[in-house]
Image (spheres, rainbow, N blue to C red):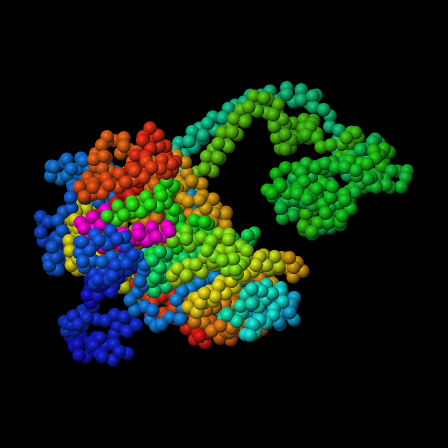
Amino acid sequence: MVVAGDPKASALMDRVTTSDPDDRMPPKKLGRTLSASQVTMLRRWIEQGAVWGKHWAFERIKRPVIADAKTHPVDYLVEQRLNDEKLTPNVRASRETRIRRLSLDLTGLPATPEQVDSFLADTKPGAWERLVDRTLASPAYGERMAWDWLEAARYADTNGYQGDNERTMWPWRDWVVRAFNANLPYDRFTIWQLAGDLLPDATQEQVLATGFNRNHMINGEGGRIAEENRVDYVFDMTETMGTIWLGLTLNCCRCHDHKFDPLLQRDYYRFTAFFNQTPVNGGGGNAQTPPVIEFGSAAQAAKAKAAQATAGQAAAAVQRRAGELEKQQAAWESKTAQDTPASPWRTLEPLRAKANKQTLEILDRDRVYASGANPPKDEYEITYGLGPGEIRGFKLDAIRHPKMTHGGLARSDSGNFVLTDIRFRLNQPDGPGAELEISGSQATFEQGPFKIEKAYDKQADSGWAVWAGKPIDRDHAAVFRLKQPVRVQANAELLVSLTFNSKHPQHNLGHFRLSATDAPKPALDKGEDALQRALSTPHEHRNNEQKKRIREALLASDPQWGKLKKEASDAEAKIKSLSKGLPKVMVMKDLDKPRPTYVLTRGLYNQKGEEVQAAVPPALPPLASTGSTNRLALARWLVSREHPLTARVTVNRFWQMLFGIGLVKTPEDFGVQGEVPVQRKLLDWLAVEFIESGWDVKHLLRTIVSSEAYQRSSVIATPAAYERDPQNRLLARGPRFRMPSWMLRDQALAAAGLLHPEIGGAPVKSYQPAGVWSEATFGKKKYQVAKGQDLYRRSLYTFWRRIVGPTMFFDTAKRQICEVKPFRTNTPMHALSTLNDITYVEAARAMAESLLHDANDDAARFRIAGKRLLGREPSAGEVKIWKRSLERTATAFAAEPEAARHFLSHGASERDESLHMETHAAWAALCLNLLNLDETLNKE
Amino acid sequence: MNAAWNILDPAAPAPVQDRQLAINRRQFFGRSATGIGAFALAGLLDRDKLLAAPPAGNNGLPGLPHFPPKAKRIIYLFQNGAPTHIDLFDYKPALHKLHGTPVPEEYLVGKRFSTMTGNPSGKLMLQPIEPFKQHGKSGAWVSALMPHTARIADELCFIKSMHTEAVNHAPAISFLLSGAEIPGRPTMGAWLNYGLGSSSQDLPGFVAMTSVSKGTSCGQIFYDFYWGSGFLPTRFQGAKFRGSKDPVLYLSNPKGMKPELRRGLLDDLAELNQLKYQEAGDPEIQTRIAQYEMAYRMQTSVPELTDFSDEPEHVLALYGPQVREPGTFAYNCLMARRLAERGVPFVQCMHAGWDQHNSLTTELYTQCKDTDQASAGLVQDLKMRGMLDDTLVIWGGEFGRTPFIQGNIKNRPRWGRDHHPYTFTVWMAGGGVKPGISYGASDELGFNAVDQPVHVHDFQATVMQLLGINHEQLTYRFQGRYFRLTDVHGHVVKDILA
């Protein structure tokens, strides 16, 4: 294509100069052509040897020389360029404009009139620098900085997708605010978020910071394949890292090698290998999918600590009392043995026990125990020898045994059994055998439709079962009452058959005992039987269960112990409920055994190609050669001095925040297809300054805002000036653009005096018209508007439902994937929001109220209103229109007091009814207009 | 070289702001002022005769349409959840014969189904649940479930060989509407809004409305990326009209703020903003003044839009009894016609509930009842008004449903069909499409599109063609490459163009 030094021999020159439309580059369908001067430039470049370096953004960052030590380096570089272009920069903006600009940029809130006055009064040198320091020290600074970070980190309070379950990632959001306010250096800010969990002796905070990676959407839709989800999450984590730190469009490489940048598909999957190591399996829509940590607010932490202490004391008191009682055990035992009524139940001892399929053994003379291969179904026959007496009922005790599943009652999958049939047949020595008819029954527990009656209903497959939704943790029993009492003769035999014929396989009772009674109304006792049995067993022969039973009875007999025990369990319940209220934040953790990573053909989760190892692309500097190749290594690599991208990309985003457009206007793409910076030296100087300051974010911002370039007036003096540089890329003017909608809301609340400045905590539900959630979710989610001060929290704390974002904002990131470029549109829908949303109407009313309180004459009120919203007093021309507007509106409201009353009724805050209603309404209407002034909506 | 390409080059747009600025640039060359308060205009001329206000409407891109369009507007009746082509339009007599027999294995090779079906091997074939008949001169086969649609069969062009790539709802809907399964690309309406603009001075150029049949058990959600603008500026996204008497959020003046009071205040506001413009010179201020005017006009035009009292009984009757009930599909269909009449070029009515996994013999009847008459009524109404010629109506979902059963064949009340991307049916009417034809075909089981298959990208290319757009030439640069609705695919289906 190119023959160095010889344009004529270079095919490239042919292609850009030929008149054949089919050969001519760029192709016609792109709709662009090279200008004559561009063609000349190409020719000259070839003549000069066609030197082709690396793409600029992949070159190591070098600090450009600033020849003039007296000029601010930013201005030195900007003015060089302006001189080249023969452009004259604007003068400094007024102090009023500058303090408003600075305050909105760095805190997202307007300067208060007091702040304006004190800045205006500071006539000593260094006033601006002092103002900058004061502003950076405001706690509102961290909140302002957090917003953009949350958009990049796709933070939201729900999962997204169908179901859209609510998550609790907000402690991570609060950490971001704290980190900015504490000016955590950006290299640590990076390492903690990407890999804080892997730091040696990681603190809670460092682990919390890794919630960053887990802010991705979670898809809990039925029918989704878990692995497909998991791979999506890994892609998302990788691409978010790619956009925020590398400024590269990694997503292009999911399916193929990058068309423009030196990135192969393999490089992409090598990046994913860093993130492919968490235990997340992709299944389900749990909004707190482990790994998680619990992390509450400071107040919550204090409450939890107090509850722990209380619970500890209560538990100790219980122990003490138990110790006292144990000393009295012997006396208690003998007394109790006398007092406890004799059990009406007589244990029967089997002579024989056999099953069709299993082996039945007789344990301790009275219990039957099943072993051997466990068949799907079985039938037992147990023969008991009986002495003379009367029998009115039988009791079957199902007794847990360690050999049963989960130590339960059977060797089924769950430890549960289904007794489908039980029959009692009595063989008297002198007569024919007879079946004993059952007339009633009682059971310790019945599992849903598996009622005890089903065990003798003559239906072959219905029966009695006891599963209570959790592993079986108690013995069970059933009583069968006989229709007719039966008189038993000596040497009679009782044949009991138990059938397990359920469709649930292997639900064969594995360990049981039978008793009989002559009590008139046979019934389950309340444990007296077992207690009596335990007490009558000599100490040395008591088994653990019996010891436990006696101890429990001993404790239960003491009212004081009962009271202490209740206090202790209440305290435990309190801890539990507090912990339940504690947000669980999803964080990072790597598997012990690394998960292999593959290139996925066309990005499909199940189309595995070549296996790859975690690594960085060869076009970028290598990873540190020591230590593991894990996320921590990746994070440290990103913030190494040698890295050509991180500092440039980051500085560019901060520049974009202040000037509305980045030095590279494609903040998400520093690759070949992204923009080459108009002021590359400026970008590089700032990037080096940032790194060498120790990645000091406040220092960087201070540096930028102290330049003349930042402080210039934004006025467009002539159409020609605008035509020359419509986007202000050369910085002859100061920035002027419509603020983000969240900032408009904060500004309105602040100017109205409604803003509640509490920092952090669970998200709040600000005003939103009724029905927005339920319409989007078929009524499944209902929006409960907050009450009281929560209505007036900063926008940062507004609850963000991913599938239907808060309606009071517009032009925001969608919080679905990483977004780093602000939207800034100008539509009628936005006008309707700021004119009619209750937030603004109420703010106007509150602002009007305070104006009426703060001054007695209209002129003074106008001055205060101007200062609050615009940071300046209104001009005479403006006052004239405001006054006229106010008078006309006041007349209209005076003619219709009902309208005034209605207009003052919006919003939950109280209104001062002592104010003259029509006057108040007229001022509120004026304030609503002032909230909609172009100047109010813009940072300028 | 790179630098020369980019510096101050208005042809290298910064995706977010430049369009607005491009309009502003044009202002310098004296575009006429329309749709702006008289006062604002006076002030404007006062300052600088060179600077005229931007129109409140949206003029689209220069050079568009690429050629004379057949359709000037689209009403897309999107059926979320995937209507069963087997039971509605794609008649397969062979299914009666094979009813209850296992699906022939040769149809399953290499196919992917949703995890609800999993391995389809051995599933039993299920015949259409209602009889089919041929209708009209065209002899189109339509199920008895759709009597009203059957009656207008001669107006319709059935595409019976649609096929797609996704097997789950959200990705498939996103694919159909934006050309990509993953959210983040502009939807069709946003592309058209961006490219062609809108002549409406009082209403947004792209309106989306949603509805769902009462008692529907399915839980498909209407994600706002179904009418999103993706990486295009948000002013091109669909304005979501809500299913209530107040379809636009924040439209109504706060109580106590009478329209005449607001009018006066807006004039004051424009005057103040004009003062600001004198001082600051930012052309964006003029756009703002114009947009506030548009907002005010919407306050009048939208209530007028939703006031059906001017509709005669016989017109209301076309749409069926639910037409008076805000939030129903019938209501939205009539709204769509009223929007179209008022110059809104893209209306997207989405109706959910077609996901008949186990409700073919129950909820499917409700779905049809709630959509059949209104859809047919809309086509007839447009025709009566002479609007059908240049209005393209599209009816269809994101994929089809399996010719085999989901559920137990002995349990008729719970019969269902699972997701099926390999063929499905969509119909179009008006707007330059041949009426009374069926295009393409699936195989004898309704399993695969075999004759003249129409891929989603082909469908998109065809729709754009009808609007006078070469789908390969409407592009937008984002993240380093040029994007278009049809990605790098798509062939216009010429045979259906009238």
Q: Is residue B282 magenta?
A: yes
Q: Nearer the viewer, residue B324 or A25?
A: B324
**Residue B434 in the figure: left or right of residue A924:** right
Residue found at the very far right of the displayed protein: A430
**Residue B133 in the figure: left or right of residue A181:** right
The chief SS type of the magenta part is: helix
Tell me what residue is drawn at x 54 percent, y 69 percent: B153
Residue found at the very far front of the displayed protein: A895
Residue A725 x %, y %: 18, 58
Q: How many labels, in total? A: 0
Residue A187 x %, y %: 27, 48
Q: Nearer the viewer, residue A234 or B490?
A: B490
Q: Quadrant of the N terminus of chain A?
A: bottom left
**Residue A681 in the figure: left or right of residue A498:** left
Instruction: Indicate whether A533 appears above or below A593.
Output: above
The magenta span reads B272-300
Instruction: Indicate whether A545 appears above or below A468.
Output: above
Q: Nearer the viewer, residue B127 or A406?
A: B127
Q: Is residue B388 magenta?
A: no
Residue A660 x %, y %: 25, 52
Quarter residue A512 falls in: top right
Residue A434 x %, y %: 86, 41
Tell me what residue is drawn at x 53 percent, y 68 percent: B152
Q: Is residue A690 visible?
A: no
Q: Is residue B148 visible?
A: yes
Tell me what residue is drawn at x 65 percent, y 39 percent: A400
**Residue B489 in the figure: left or right of residue B95:** left
Tell me what residue is drawn at x 79 percent, y 39 percent: A438
Q: Nearer the viewer, residue B449 or A274?
A: B449
